[in-house]
Image (cartoon, rainbow, N blue to C red):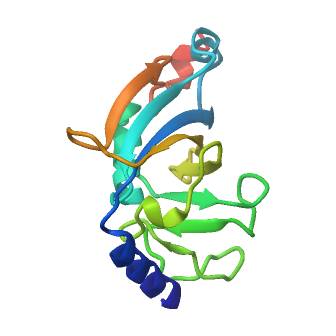
Amino acid sequence: MARLQTERRTARRTSGQVHLYTLDVFIISGPIAKKFAKKNRVISRTIQIRGDQTLEDLHYAIFDALDREDQHMFEFQLGGKGLMDPKARRYVLHADTNDLVSGRKPAGDVHDTTIQLLGLKVDEAFSYWFDFGDDWWHQINVVAIEEKTGRGKFPKLTKRTGESPPQYVDWDKEEE
């Protein structure tokens, strides 16, 4: 709770200058059929988001950019040395509960945590985990941070590479 209050105070102090973040989002694992993966060796989306927007806003931008249909649990992980590193800072849907694995409280709630509060730097990467049953893992690379946000509605999809994989693979059809 103290960390969240500190983040909110920091947001008020820096609220005069909002940056624009350009992020490349790559699918790195998930239930993708081999045939689909062969045709789409790289699946990525480039998204621009304002620093005063939240991780929840980023989630919805990724959800829409990948043509997903059904909402599921999700979280973002920063720092650490790989996926599910217990030392990573985790930003979750309900930060008022302890992590079942580590027993630690998450670093923050996606509803309240703005992109700017993460302290991201260009060339840094972090993770996005969507659907804890199917385990869609994404790597998010920070491509650019600009001081001026420009005009238009954000978050904004600016580039698509590869087709969007179906959220649910019909494995029976894939085996034919």
Whether residue 84 is visible here, answered yes or no, is: yes
Residue at the right extreme of this rendering: 81
70 vs 157: above or below = below
Towards the viewer: 31 or 61: 61
Residue 71 shows in the view:
no
Of 149 and 69, the residue lying toward us: 149
Quadrant of residue 14 within the rendered picture: bottom left
Does 50 sit above or below residue 166? Answer: below
Q: Is residue 53 left or right of residue 43?
A: left
- Total labels: the figure holds 0
Q: Position of residue 47 (x, y in %)?
A: 41, 36
Which one is in front, 7 or 93? 7
- The residue lying at 58 percent from left, 9 percent from top is 39
Q: Quadrant of residue 111?
A: bottom left
Quarter of the image with the C terminus is top right
Answer with left or right where residue 54 lies relative to residue 161: left
Q: Quadrant of residue 40?
A: top right
Residue 50 spot, x, y in % from top left: 35, 51
Residue 102 position within the rendered picture, expressed as x and y whole percent measured from the top left: 72, 77
Residue occupying image coordinates x 54% and y 20% = 172
Q: Position of residue 8 (x, y in %)?
A: 39, 79
Residue sticking out furthest to the bottom: 2
Image vertical order of residue 163 relative to residue 23, above or below: above
